[in-house]
Image: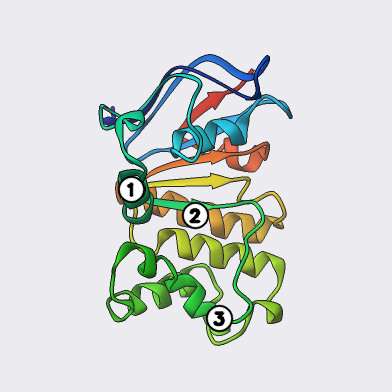
Amino acid sequence: MPDQVLEARAVRYGYRRGQTVIDDFSAHAGRGTVTAITGRSGTGKSTMLYLLAGLLTPWSGQVLLDGQSMGDLSDAELSRLRARRFGFVFQDVVLDPRRTILDSVLEPCLYAGVARADRTDRATELLNRLEVDLRATARPGEISGGQAQRVGVCRALLLEPDLVFADEPTGNLDDESADIVLSALEHAADDGCTVLVATHDPRVVERCSGRIVMA
């Protein structure tokens, strides 16, 4: 069994007092796995993903990374963690219209303090793997929505993160584009990355090695 790397213990959270979205919920995800976070609309799939990523703070309970409570980290420590160890894929990818596609993929270097030159080959390889390599010099307004989503995946994987958090990464994609994205996430897991995907897409769920069900 893979080592447990990320765990939620009795987590409770809501957006307003008295309106709890997640109540006394526990889950875990192992290293080298792709775990789907599933459930009906409104059950807190994306909220759970953001709690596990440290983007939201639970009202009560704990989120632990490698056995350490993320609640014990300072804002600066959380920022460094997200910059250096985490990758994010959001449902609506936002690319800076002033940057080329290659520049967009290299953007995490800025926050992690990594030299762009050290990751240019990696960025190019990812663009090739996700079949947007011919568009590296294009601007965001010159590519399709599906290509933009794949660029977002490249950006998330650039620094070979320990964990990737993906919110509905295939929600607006056709079958071919979805397969490209899922294959890239599976490849990352094969290299030891922990991948968590909030999704309602059965194409995603059936290919995941683990599942967290929100009720």
Note whether 96 is above or below 13 in the view shown. Answer: below
Q: Which amino acid does the dot numbered 1 rest on?
A: Ala
Q: How many marks?
A: 3
Residue beneath label 1, please?
A: 76
Q: Position of residue 70 (x, y in %)?
A: 34, 32
Helix, strand or loop at mark 2: helix
Q: Give whichever of discs 3 and 2 has the lower sequence position.
A: 3
Q: Residues within 10 Å of mark 3 (few under 14, many from 20)?
A: some
Q: Residue at x 48, y 73 (%)?
A: 127
Q: Nearer the viewer, residue 31 or 81?
A: 81
Q: Which amino acid does the dot numbered 2 rest on?
A: Ser
Residue 32 is drawn in which quadrant?
top left
Note whether 201 is above or below 116 in the view shown. Answer: above
CA–CA distance between discs 1 and 3?
27 Å
Helix, strand or loop at mark 1: helix
Residue 99 numbered tag: 3
The answer to whether residue 31 is left or right of residue 135 is: left
Q: Position of residue 6 (x, y in %)?
A: 36, 31
CA–CA distance between discs 3 and 2?
26 Å
Q: Give whichever of discs 1 and 3 has the lower sequence position.
A: 1
Q: Residues within 10 Å of mark 1 (few under 14, many from 20)?
A: few
Q: Residue furthest bottom?
A: 137
Q: Position of residue 161 (x, y in %)?
A: 34, 53
Q: Which amino acid does the dot numbered 3 rest on?
A: Arg
Q: Give whichever of discs 2 and 1 has the lower sequence position.
A: 1
Residue beneath label 2, please?
A: 183
